[in-house]
Amino acid sequence: MRALVRSLADSLILDAQAELQPAPWVYTAAIRSSADLVASLTGIACLARELGFTRDPETLYADDGCSASYHVDHAQQAISLAVTCHPLRETVSLALSGVSRDDTYASFQQVEATLFGCC
């Protein structure tokens, strides 16, 4: 038993020499919107596809069905998009995350301009 506990403890200790993976870059924005939930999600999904976000899309609805989040990954880049629509609070927020600062920020600017325009 003692050997098992020691083995488990040793497996949890990180190698000090191991190269740490960089944290992802995350960019966010939000706007006020009075659009209904279905219209918002439909538009977001369509525009996201046009921008290359086509991998593993999913829509998660709140228990009350009054708000939802849409998640999708970019087909060619290591970038993920998450958009949350909450019509009762009149908000739409987006977050873009990726491992390359420059690629993620450039994509964020494009997504923000496409989804939110000049708000």
Image (spheres, helix red, strand yellow):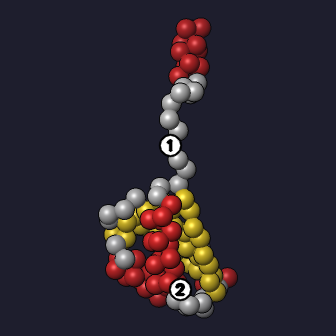
Residue with the mark numbered 1: 21
Residue with the mark numbered 2: 116
What is the CA distance from the residue labelled 1 to the residue labelled 2?
32 Å
Q: Secondary structure at mark 1?
A: loop
Name which residue type carries label 2. Phe
Q: Secondary structure at mark 2?
A: helix
Expressed as whole percent of the image width and height from the top left, the position of residue 105 reads 51, 68
Compared across the picture, whether 79 is left or right of 94 comes to left
Residue 76's disc is none
Q: Measuring 32% from the left and 65% from the top, which residue is drawn there?
A: 75
Question: Would residue 21 be visible to someone looking at this image?
Answer: yes
Name which residue type carries label 1. Gln
- Count neighbours of disc 1 (C-alpha within 10 A) and say few if under 14, some if 14 to 19, many if 20 or more: few
Considering depth in this image, is 67 or 45 the residue closer to the camera?
45
Q: Residue furthest right?
A: 89
Task: Write down the quadrant of residue 92 in the picture.
Answer: bottom right
9 in relation to 106, above or below: above
Expressed as whole percent of the image width and height from the top left, the position of residue 118 reads 56, 90
Expressed as whole percent of the image width and height from the top left, the position of residue 35 reads 55, 91
Task: Write down the quadrant of residue 77 in the picture.
Answer: bottom left
Expressed as whole percent of the image width and height from the top left, the position of residue 11 reads 53, 22
